[in-house]
Image (tube, helix red, strand yellow):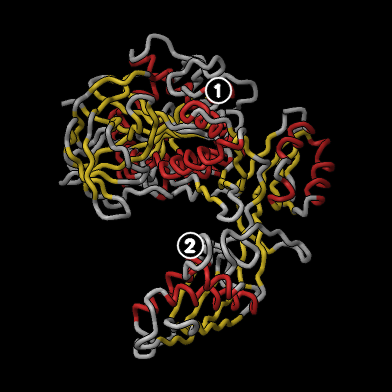
Amino acid sequence: MSQKFNIGILAHADAGKTTITEQLLGLSGRIRKSGSVDHGTTVTDFMEVEKRRGISVNSACVSLSYNGADIDIIDTPGHVDFAGEVDRSLSAMDGAVLVLSGVEGVQAQTRTIFRALRELNIPTILVCNKIDRVGFERPAFEKQLGEELTARFAPVDEPESVLAVLAEEDPDMEEAFLTEEMPEEQVLKEKLAAYTKKGTVFPLFYASAREGIGVQEILDGILTYLPGADKTEVPELSGCVFKLQYDDVMGRVAFVRLYGGMLKARDIAPVYQKEPETYEKITQIRRVQGGRFEDAGEMHAGEIAAVYGLSDIRIGDWIGTPAPGKVSGALRVRPLLLTEARAERPEDQEKLAAALTILSSEDPYLEYERNIETGQMFLHIMGEIQTEVLAEILSTRFGLTATFMKPRVIYKETAGGIGEGFEAYTMPKPCWAIVTLRVEPLRLGSGIVFESKVKEGELALRYQNHVEASVYKTLKQGLLGWEVIDVKVSLMAGNSHIWHTHPLDFFVATPIALLRALQASGSQLLEPWMKVHMEGAEDLLGKVMGQVIGMRGSFDTPYTGNGKFVMDAMMPLSECLDYPVSFRSLTSGKGLIEMELSEYRPVPEGVRETRPRNGVDPLDRAKWILACRSALSKDLTGR
């Protein structure tokens, strides 16, 4: 049986990973002619927006055979707007090819992806692409690579450099390095492969994908240095759904990485979700060969395939038993923008709501919410390009024309100090829930901490659990309408009644007490701050520094030399949301700007950004109690 590889190709946008994927397919004979990103003819970019913009917005799976090995390649998006696609694909990879541009070098998304690969310990080879471009200088590239990504890279075309890196890992290689005795080529390859698979060393290849230079070496390197799939990793049936696609005829198509067992068409498969296990019938199993789906009929451990018939499946679900340690989330994707979706025709509003509900159920990174009172539909997004993709999906799949309002920044709230809130929900009978809660701020990034200081003899444990569950739910909307983060909530006192307490009474009382505690503490508004890296002509430095200061930003001491400047800054997203466009205009398109989330910080005094509450405000006590008791015309609790 041939050896099996599941490889991800990852990069910052425009580094050339899709072109490399095309060249690998062409070299293996899977396609007759490699496509072009510029001409919109690549196998893996099939959506119109991908062809129009020349970027990948979806991960794509393709298969090839080479030197007796079967290789499944997951080509992932490089644009930060679609980091969620990358994040969920990581769980399906045994190894990775991280592509860098030889001119731009280490970029923001490069660092984020590499950090995630290391957290999951996915063996990785590095590819420096675009070496034919003007501006590429190998010494400068390797210097930046060592300083900003990893010093453990090993250029495979320099045996002496490979030996020097391995000398820090292996006693035999250390001795050879010190005695200046170069090991045989095969020994060096085997040692490099061993430590690459351990995730401690990273082979470095140089290539020009556009010209086909170095692609053969990359393909050989995948087989030599990256691990094949372990077909005995999990003894029972275990498969992760890492991608969903929609077929006009077949409906949902689930891309599954199988870690254990075997699946066949017409199997009744157990599906593990957050709810209890359910069963669904598999109608077809297909492999993606080149750009075409070909019927496979079955799939085995270690393989990736498209599975049909799983109508209720979602990304992150498992077929069979979840495999330990195979989870996504390493990229820590966090949407920072909020946009409102509107149907072009008012009569299509409900159809649009239904479509967005379906899309959000398929994609855990697409958070959709609808205001109960106004009917407005909101989406949490990474960037505006994402709305272009959503518009195309809504048009082609659902026949709907939708517009998206200009995105606004997503703020957060936290406690401004220590505060207590009390609620005695004892009327109208039958009801009885008395709660005292205390809130206090935590260090930013700490999350939510709940603590009960009440003994079980004072309040039954089940009611304390009700309070805790209600706390987490209530903190989704603070006093200003934003999610509350980084607070400690303590249950200081509680009381129930042997006759009058209803099981849901503490879900009524807790939100009132908690928001009163936040009122007492003084809710603090938080805004996202971005880490911004800029490069441009030296004569523009003064103007750029002034712009950063004008946006409430700060910067480190800039580097200047060879007629250019390099500067790292910190700026609030609310001020610099459109700055990349302005910066590129200022530098006539020759400058480089990269932004990534750093942290949330308190807003300046006097700044107040609110959003409408979804549902009845618990601080409007009488209306809240009526809504909770279904005494209003419709449920407006937002629960």
Which residue is painted at 33% across and 12% down in the image? 29
Is 219 located above or below residue 121 in the figure? Answer: above
Which dot marks residue 131?
1
Say which of 312 and 322 sits in front.
312
Which residue is painted at 61% across and 68% down in the image? 414
User: Which residue lies under the disc numbered 2?
Assistant: 639
Give neighbour class at mark 2: few <14, some 14-19, many 20+ (Cα, 10 Å).
Answer: few
Residue located farthest toward the bottom when viewing the structure as drawn? 457
Drawn side of residue 505 relative to residue 108, left or right: left
Give the amino acid type for the residue marked by disc 1 in the picture. Answer: Ile
Image coords of residue 156 (percent x, y) = 41, 29
Task: Tell me the SS state at disc 2.
Answer: loop
Which residue is painted at 28% across and 34% down in the image? 190
Q: How many marks?
A: 2
Say which of 436 and 117 sits in front.
436
Image coords of residue 279 (percent x, y) = 22, 45
Image coords of residue 435 (percent x, y) = 49, 83
Real-space Cα distance between discs 1 and 2? 55 Å
Drawn side of residue 327 relative to residue 492, left or right: left
Give the amino acid type for the residue marked by disc 2 in the picture. Answer: Arg
Which residue is painted at 32% across and 23% down in the image? 288
Say which of 631 and 49 sits in front.
631
Does residue 615 appear in this view?
Answer: yes
